[in-house]
Image (tube, coloured by chain):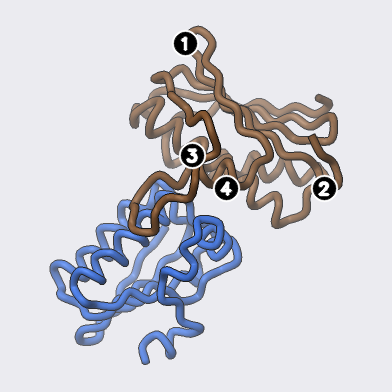
Chain colours: A blue, B brown
Amino acid sequence: MEIKVKRDGSCSIVYVSGDIDLHSSPKLRETVLDLFRKRGQEKVILNLSQVPYVDSSGIASLVEGLQEAKKKNARFVLVGLNESPRHVLELTRLLNVFEIAASEEEAVG
Amino acid sequence: MAEEVEVIIAGDPRWLRLARGVVEEFLAQTGFHAQQREEIAVAVGEAVANVIRHAYKGDTRQKFSLLCNEGNGAVEIELRDQGEPFDPPKEPIPPPDETSAGGRGIFMMQAIMDEVEYTRQGNTNSVRMKKYLPGKTG
């Protein structure tokens, strides 16, 4: 899995490429939490268009990101959900819990 | 059961994708359609992650067996490890609260597969996951 972060003022876009599983999810978790905690970002957009697979540890990282955003009165937006990660979020009844944008442009708002 | 694949894989998160790939390749020889194959691989990925985290507690020198069988209208995927004993849930578990960071793996396995059974014999843990082929029932 590869992560690239593009920062623009108080908004960051995190581009993830590859599977988010037990092997890679700690890196994603650290990246997202750091953006809220250390960089004080008001909005973090997670672009998942290059992510074919997310497991429960990846879901846990997303939930932690969302909880941190709520704590900081910030926004955590998912964009580019592929079929399998979307299905896993549906299965775990979390699809409606996250803010999901149809495109990066919409997420940036 | 007619078909059989058995591979031995190190209990290292780096090989999670390999384990899922073996299962998807095996399922490609069966009557499951693409989305079902993907779902079953998700369930098996969760079971493998449980072996790595809970049975072997991150000791990547340990190995587990992954067995795939097809027969009697179903596929059965089994994992065997020699790690710490596991106390499985006796009943289907509900989905975790949306604020909970963990605890979704077993829920996902139970939601995707038709049967999930844990046993321990001697020093070996086994989790057997069964999924009936489309149009077949238990």
Image location of residue A24, percent across then percent down: 38, 51
CA gap between label 4 and label 1 equals 26 Å
In primary-sequence order, the first of circles 2 and 3 is 3
| Circles 4 and 1 on the same chain | yes
CA gap between label 2 and label 1 equals 35 Å
In primary-sequence order, the first of circles 4 and 1 is 4
Indicate the secondary structure of the residue bearing disc 2. Answer: loop
Identify residue for label 3. B15
Comparing labels 2 and 4, the label whose residue is closer to the camera: 2
Q: Amino acid at mark 3?
A: Trp
Who is closer to the viewer here, A33 or B112?
Answer: B112
CA gap between label 3 and label 4 equals 14 Å
In the rendered structure, find residue B134 and report the number of the disc placed on it. Answer: 2
CA gap between label 1 and label 3 equals 23 Å
Indicate the secondary structure of the residue bearing disc 1. Answer: loop
Q: Residues within 10 Å of mark 2 (few under 14, many from 20)?
A: few
Image location of residue B131, percent across then percent down: 72, 39
Quarter of the image with the N terminus of chain B in it? top right
Q: Chain of mark 4?
A: B
In the rendered structure, find residue B42 and report the number of the disc placed on it. Answer: 4
Q: Amino acid at mark 4?
A: Val
In primary-sequence order, the first of circles 2 and 1 is 1
